[in-house]
Amino acid sequence: MVEKLWFLIPEMIVFGGAVLVSVLGLSKRKVIRDALPIVAGGSLLAALIVTPMLYDAEHVAAANLLMGNLGLYVKVVVCGIGILLVMMNTGLIDRRLESAVAAGRAKFDPISATRGEFFAFLLLSLTGLMLCSNANDLIWLFLALELTSLPTYVMVAMSRGSKKAQEAAVKYFFLGALSAAIFLYGFALLYGASGTIVLTEMRDVFARQADFGDVSNLAIVGMILSILGISFKIAAAPMHFYAPDVYQGAAAAVAAFLAFVPKFAGLLALMLLLSTIGWENHYRFTEIGLPPALQITLWIIAVLTMTLGNVGALLQTSIKRILAYSSIAHSGYMLIGILAGPGLGMSAVLFYMLAYGLMNTAAFAVLAGLERSGREIETLDDLAGLRQRHPLMAGVMVVSALSLIGFPPLLGFWGKLYLFIAGIEAGHILLVVIAGLNSAISAWYYLGLVKMPMLEQPSARAETVVRGPSLWPRVAGLITAAAVIVVPLFTRNLLKASDAAVADEQVFVTPDTDDSQQLASRK
Amino acid sequence: MIDALMNLSLGQHAAAPFTVLTLSHYLLLSAALFVLGLLGFLTRRNMIVMFLCTELMFQAAAIAMIAFGRYHMDVSGQVFVIFILTIAAAEAALALALVVLLYRRKETLNADAWSELREPAGE
């Protein structure tokens, strides 16, 4: 147990940051309250620095996790993008209260100040995501997923004072609770089918069942329920329909958070759960591979998700809704990697998650950094002729939209390339063809995001778009856009890192006599 | 359907006489609760009732966990249930806070009263 705690040091640091931030948020001094994002970002930076020091072969072997090295890649990526998300959320909360206090119209009252809680929730959610990568039993995985999700419901409600944000929060919460109940029931069935909640042991049980014929049907049903429940977290069909409403209702900076954090957590959970049943040539499952029922389920979900996402985005006028549908579509692409399995498939998913996190954050940063008559810009018209008034933001929007299409040589292109290669290698040719067609459809609406700021003349409405009060969302936009251009130079290194993250530490073990005796006694 | 599943996966127990409570009876109960919760969630529009329906589904999973734990003579199923209760309590706190927040705005618990966010119609 102590070996497992060793890897939790980054989570503890971020959790400590969350506690600190929530206390400091009550301070009467504005200087301290203004420093909250710095404290939050600082704790993430500390976790980012500490993480690589923790992962050495000895400790990884001692912890005996399902995927021992997964945490290294995941935590570094999450802390890095987490810092950018903190920057984007700077200046979002308590704006009215702060300006009223500054103008002398109100006195500071800790009860109406919510900035401390907001950043604490943000850090807690990131903690949950990081915990997902270490999960080695169903309880841990369940708690980590819930820790990722529960704070996001509050963040949506807090993000704007408007009715829309509250409606979004309630929709998000109710569907979230429903999905949690569904995958929890799936977990119960998985436990029933295997008799253990520890994922590594569960894998051995399923492997033995496979040796004696087939993995039990109960496990398959449990797995399908888990997949359906988790598809809410990654915004995949059939639980995707909340995404446009919720992203539209939440502030842009929080929407960027929703598009990255729960999605990453859901994908990690899918990877861990599916590797207990296994793919072809994975662990002991040398021949059977993923059971056909699961393959078909994932295949249908992938096709539905990418198609519904891309078709849904075509007729939208709100940029947030477009980005929400694009978030759905990208989940569909990533499911190809999940279907392809360990090796290239999963490392392509991890790489794509980094790419998607950067390019999607860049797009939302433009919305968070600009405003029109005191509100975030939202419709496509607001972007018209952005090039003339805010050239840098126009540039960020263009870079991120091109990258989301998968325009070479930007980051999104490499991400998609590896996913498609993984899909073809695993024999899912038809799926990759459908994904390719979908990418072509997606070019239609992404190019709208390129055309509006660059080619159109500014309308009277767009003339009134001004910079937002805080500098930091725009800085985050510039950094992410620069990263989308520069990071492809390091694709090889990143792929090596993500390969190492999913490499199976466990060597192939033949079922020896001990095993079969245990099995006999179990029966 | 659960009966058939149990027959396939766990064998002999499902065939026990009705007077003896076996695993499959507990699983039937939990499946019934789960389906009731799901149907209630989909058909009811009162936000508190909808939330209670998700709680019902959580408890269905908890019953299945305990039944399986007993079946496998393994304590971890019961441990899981304690954590399920904790999470359910956390969700209840959150749900009631959100519902109160919304009730203050519109003085109704009907979920359909909140439909400002939707697809743009006929554009």
Image (cartoon, coloured by chain):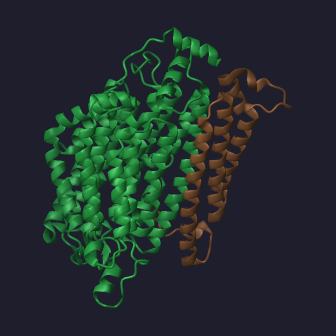
Chain colours: A green, B brown
Residue lying at the far right in this picture: please name it: B19
| Residue found at x 53% / y 14% | A515
> Residue at point 28% right, 71% down?
A91
* Residue at the far top in the pictured view: A513
Observer-nearest residue: A56 or A300? Answer: A56
Tell me which residue sits at (61%, 37%) in the image. Answer: B77
In the image, residue A495 above or below residue A438: above
* Residue A306 picture quarter: top left
Residue at screen point 36% across, 87% down: A107
Is A369 in front, or is A185? A185
Give percent across and percent down for residue A305.
43, 44
Q: Quadrant of the C terminus of chain A?
A: top right
Q: Is residue A332 left or right of residue A467?
A: right
Where on the picture, by quarter, is residue A131?
Answer: top left
Quarter of the figure that contains the N terminus of chain A:
top left
- Looking at the picture, does residue A488 appear above or below residue B71? below
Q: Nearer the viewer, residue A40 or A91?
A: A40
Tell me how many marks there are.
0
- Please provide percent x and percent y for residue A320: 35, 61
**Coordinates of residue A221 in the picture (x, y in percent):** 59, 33
Q: Is residue A268 above or below residue A400?
A: above
Q: Could you tell me residue A450's position as x and y percent? A: 22, 57
Vertical order, A325 against A137 (above or below): below
Q: Is residue A326 visible?
A: no
Q: Is residue A420 visible?
A: yes
Furthest residue toward front? A2
